[in-house]
Image (cartoon, helix red, strand yellow):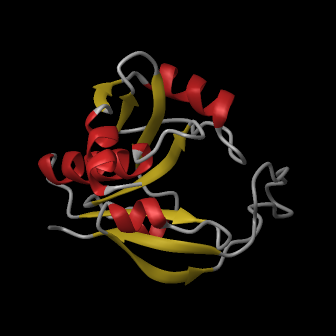
Amino acid sequence: MSIVRQAVASRCLELQPISLAEAKQFVASHHRHHQPPVGHKYSIAVNNGDDIVGVIIVGRPVARAYDDGWTLEVTRCCCIDGARNAASKLYGAARRAAWALGYRRLITYTLPSESGASLRGAGWRCIGIRGGGSWDCPSRPRVDKAPTGQKLLWEANDN
């Protein structure tokens, strides 16, 4: 696709506010391997002029070590297949919103099988591989409903 056509395609995408309930419903219907998260700090949607084609949900970090009051985590980013550049637009908007709210760090995780092209396109950088594993333990049994292997940790650049 030519640069001119890409620019026109990305201009057709518009950001819009979305409630957590609506974002969770979108994730429940379209995400490949995760259920909706429980809560959030904020959510953002992107539409193609007619319909919502993607959502991003940002909340407190899942890992307690990162929950320092200055860090947020993208807990879900979900776009409909074929919504070109929607994920990059959402990751960029999530970063700008976090900075505007006074946060200093924004992170997310991807599976090693995912390319990370949308994150790189939005100016994020891969920090490295992180543990992964099950939350199940004898004192608090759980059923794993999502991939439990190693993940890649990404961080938004502050530019």
Relative placement, left or right, of 3 versus 80 is: left
- Residue 130 percent location from the top left of the image: 58, 79
Residue at left 28%, top 58%?
Answer: 69
- In the depicted structure, whether residue 31 falls above or below residue 142: above
Outermost residue toward the bottom in this view? 128
- Residue 71 percent location from the top left of the image: 31, 61
- Residue 28 percent location from the top left of the image: 66, 30
- In the depicted structure, whether residue 125 falls above or below residue 63: below
Q: Nearer the viewer, residue 136 or 10?
A: 10
- Residue 95 percent location from the top left of the image: 26, 54
- In the depicted structure, whether residue 94 falls above or below residue 42: below
Residue at left 81%, top 53%?
Answer: 144
Q: Nearer the viewer, residue 88 or 95?
A: 88
Relative placement, left or right, of 110 versus 101 is: right
- Quarter assignment of residue 157: bottom left
Q: Quadrant of the N terminus?
A: bottom left
Q: Quadrant of the C terminus?
A: bottom left
Q: How many marks do you count on the picture?
A: 0
Residue at left 84%, top 54%?
Answer: 141
- In the depicted structure, whether residue 2 falls above or below residue 11: below
